[in-house]
Amino acid sequence: MAIKQLTETIINQIAAGEVIERPASVVKELVENAIDAGATRIDIVTAGGGKNLIRITDNGSGIPSDELALAVSRHCTSKLTDNVHDIQALGFRGEALPSIGSISRLSLKSRTADADSGFEIAVNGGRMDGPRPTGMNGGTIVEVRDLFFSTPARLKFMKTDRAEATAISDVVKRTAIAFPHIRFSINGSDRTPLEMAATGVGSEGMLERISQVLGKEFPENAIGIDAMRDGVRLTGFAGIPAFNRANSLHQFAYVNGRPVRDKQIWGAIRGAYADVMSRDRHPVAVLFLNLDPELVDVNVHPAKADVRFRDPGLVRGLIVGAIRQALGQSGIRAATTGAEAMLQSFRPGGVEPRSATQTWDNGNIHSSNQNYSTQQSPFRPFETVPVAASDGHGLAEAVQEFLYDGAHALSADARASTSSPAPELLSMPLGAARAQVHANYIVAQTDDSLVIVDQHAAHERLVYEALKNALHSRPLPAQMLLIPEIVDLPEDDVGRLVAHAETLQRFGLGIESFGPGAIAVRETPSMLGEIDTQQLIRDLADEIAEHDTSDGLKAILDHVAATMACHGSVRAGRRLKPDEMNALLRQMEATPGSGTCNHGRPTYIELKLTDIERLFGRR
Ligand code: ADP
Ligand code: MG
């Protein structure tokens, strides 16, 4: 075949293949155009998940009638001067409108402030028609019908209307977060309407917009971030660990105001939370990076979702450092959603029949944390509040038991509860321990609240922090076993464990190989107390196998510490003496990050006296 120049329409369709993957990509491009045009109001209507219709109306600058034809022509843009690195607008490639016009029936109506009327131009599968006058107010209306009608192969890849409609909402929300001063609405027969009012500017307006997108409980469960390093500024909000999700869809990142989905940024967020969240849970975070446009390339991909930083290490360090610091400062804060859920369960008459997911099987927490991934509620804290113990008793009953049967049930162990607590204890953040119920929950009292601590989760966190400290200072004391314990293991596992024997010794775990298929354990860490050595060694072997090749030594150490902490924690079921309970509370107060366990679940919940009074109708 002879060589021929491709037709304009084919070129545009090829470009569309890169820029327009699904209806949501059209919405992204059109919304970005409206933002670039200075709109303060953007209204979106869709039908058939955007496959049948997408209409976007804005009140921006509009397009002069004599430029309408250029707007839908390839490589025509009003946004780029002669420096491709100095990009201020969201668009700059001049590709979106011609691409969309080549694969759909596109209509572009626009009116500038000084024009007597509006003008409309249509593009039908690449063929231009117009411009001709049309009646309209100032701004631009872009209508896209029958998307992909000229490329049926693409159409086959579309998901259900519902899924495409959701993807459109996600794109709009993602973009809206960066532009709180713009009012957005989405309507259509294929969806539930969404309306985001314009909010103020500054970090308060930002937080308000984020709440519109992520829910009103976000502000109470997030910590503000503002950090700067070598000319790169990071602002935004990091969710506290207990406020976690089952997927990473609730992580939003913006580079110079542009929404991006960048693997390096995701990786940095994950790294920042590695210590405080189980691997199958995901933090909620909204991060804005601002830097000299010269230091970042946004033109890596036609859809502009990826970016390339000149110094990726700097950006990663900034994100990890700033989030960790924020989490550290937030100290022992637990998720408010936990207390909320507790209020719900206490509320008279409002107690729902308890479902299986609401029960809390103690067996789950130390064996593996994967058990939680199948639960349905968006926030973990709702389920982890121990609404019902495994014997079917609810928390409410437990507290009642404590109040009514308490008097005679109080053994020597808990006699402290009968006398009034020392005032200096009451003024501590976690208060004075009054009782232990269901062998795992410490009920404590402060000046103005009731605190319930999950002793297993709390202790696990404390042990973990101590183990990590031990790495940097003295090795942990070890306890010699009278008879070495022999653990049979596959040869690979034996090899890997022995390779890390020296490190494990720092933690107080003395092991050596015992023939090719076994490990002899001679010493265990004293602070762990009595442990199931067999299980600990097997879990450690699994952890090391999983992280040996992929992560560095630091990551392995963290995982080893977490595994050990899990084994050494005060198991649910151990009775604690009043002194032990109070000691645990004081230790929690002194330990950064003790508000959540290593898996990101809350270690305690607090019920304010005012809330209790409200429950009784006193307020
Ligand atoms: P780009 O956004 O990369 O410049 P597009 O193909 O998306 O390319 O748009 C081409 C041009 O059309 C833009 O540069 C802009 O001048 C104009 N334009 C598109 N949409 C709008 C709008 N909603 N309001 C005003 N001008 C617009
Ligand atoms: Mg554009």
Image (cartoon, grey):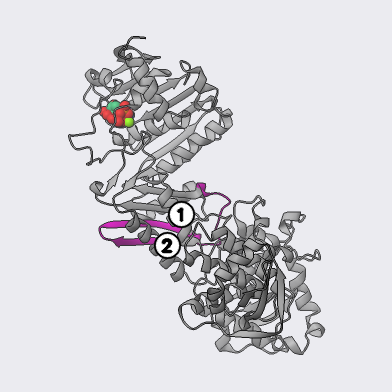
- Taking depth in this image into account, of 436 and 148 the one nearest to the observer is 148
Q: Does residue 385 lie above or below 478 as drawn?
A: above
- Residue for badge 1: 285
- Taking depth in this image into account, of 251 and 453 the one nearest to the observer is 251
Q: On the image, which quarter does residue 281 sit in?
A: bottom right
Residue positioned 45% across, 58% down in the render: 238
Queried on whether the Cβ of the residue with tag 2 lies below 8 angstroms from ligand 2, the answer reads no
Q: Does residue 149 lie above or below 281 as drawn?
A: above
Pick whichever of labels 1 and 2 is earlier in the sequence.
1
Residue positioned 53% across, 36% down in the render: 166
- Image location of residue 62, percent across then percent down: 28, 27
Q: In terms of secondary structure, where does tag 1 sit?
A: strand
Residue positioned 31% across, 20% down in the render: 72
- Image quadrant where one finds the N terminus: top left
User: Could you tell whether 50 is left or right of 31 in the image?
Assistant: right
Crowding near pointer 1: few (<14 within 10 Å), some, many (20+)? many
Q: Does the image show residue 139?
A: no
Q: Does residue 479 lie above or below 197 as drawn?
A: below
Q: Quadrant of ligand 2?
A: top left
Cβ atoms at labels 1 and 2 below 8 Å apart: yes
**How many numbered badges does the structure rendering display?**
2
Q: Residue furthest left?
A: 82
Q: In terms of secondary structure, where does tag 2 sit?
A: helix
Chain part drawn in magenta = 220-249
Query: Which three-letter amino acid code belongs to the residue tagged 1?
Result: Ala
Q: Is residue 236 magenta?
A: yes
**In the rendering, which numbered label is found on residue 323?**
2
User: Could you tell whether 226 is left or right of 545 in the image?
Assistant: left
Query: Which three-letter amino acid code belongs to the residue tagged 2?
Result: Ile
Q: Does the image show residue 400?
A: yes
